[in-house]
Image: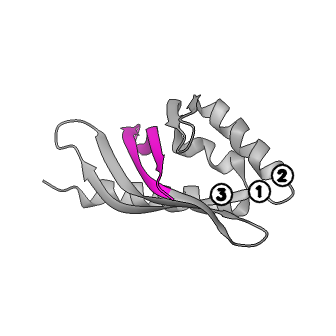
Amino acid sequence: MTNPTAELAIRSARAAFNRAIAARTADAIGPILSRDCVMVTGTDSAIVSGRMAQVKLWRRMFAAPSPDLYVRTTDSVTVSPVEPIALETGTWQGSDSATGAVIASGVYTAKWREVQGQWVIEAETFVTLA
C-alpha cells in the first residue's frame, strides 16, 4: 500500500533540508529533525545524537570560509501501512562550495516519523562510496 501524501511530505522536507544546506541556514534544519534524532556519518561513522548537536555541527560547518555543501537525492520512500514511520533511501554528494568539486559521495537511508502531522527525521545513516 502506498501513501502518496506522506511520500510527498517527506520528499518536500528533504528538499527543504537541501535548501537549508545550500543557503547555509542551520536553524532551518532543526525543525526537520526529531528531538532525539541520530546521524551516522559516511566516512568515519561518527554518531551525532540529538537535534541540537546536529544543528551545532551544521553551524560550525557553515561558519567555515568555504564550507562543504551536501545534497541528498531521494530514490525511494517506503511508508509503513501500520505505523507513522517511513524509510527514505537515496544518494548523497558533498562538494567544495568554492570550486564545486565533488569531495565525496555515496548512499544513505533515513527513518522518518510523523509527529503531530509533521514528518521528521529520526535517524540517518550515510555510507561513503566515492
Mark 1 and mark 3: span between their CA atoms?
10 Å
Point out which mark residue 21 bears: 3
Which amino acid, mark 3?
Answer: Ile
Point out which mark residue 67 bears: 1
Q: Magenta segment range?
A: 106-130
- Write the residue at 23% across / 35% down: 83
Q: Nearer the viewer, mark 1 or mark 3?
A: 1
Residue 109 part of the magenta-drawn span: yes
Q: Is residue 64 above or below residue 54?
A: below
Mark 1 or mark 3: whose residue is earlier in sequence: 3
Which amino acid, mark 2?
Answer: Ala
Horizontally, is 17 left or right of 7 in the view? right
Contact, mark 1 vs mark 3 (Cβ under 8 Å): no
Point out which mark residue 64 bears: 2
Q: Residues within 10 Å of mark 2 (few under 14, many from 20)?
A: few
Can you give x and y, in whole percent of width and height, for residue 118 in the image?
A: 43, 44
Contact, mark 1 vs mark 2 (Cβ under 8 Å): yes
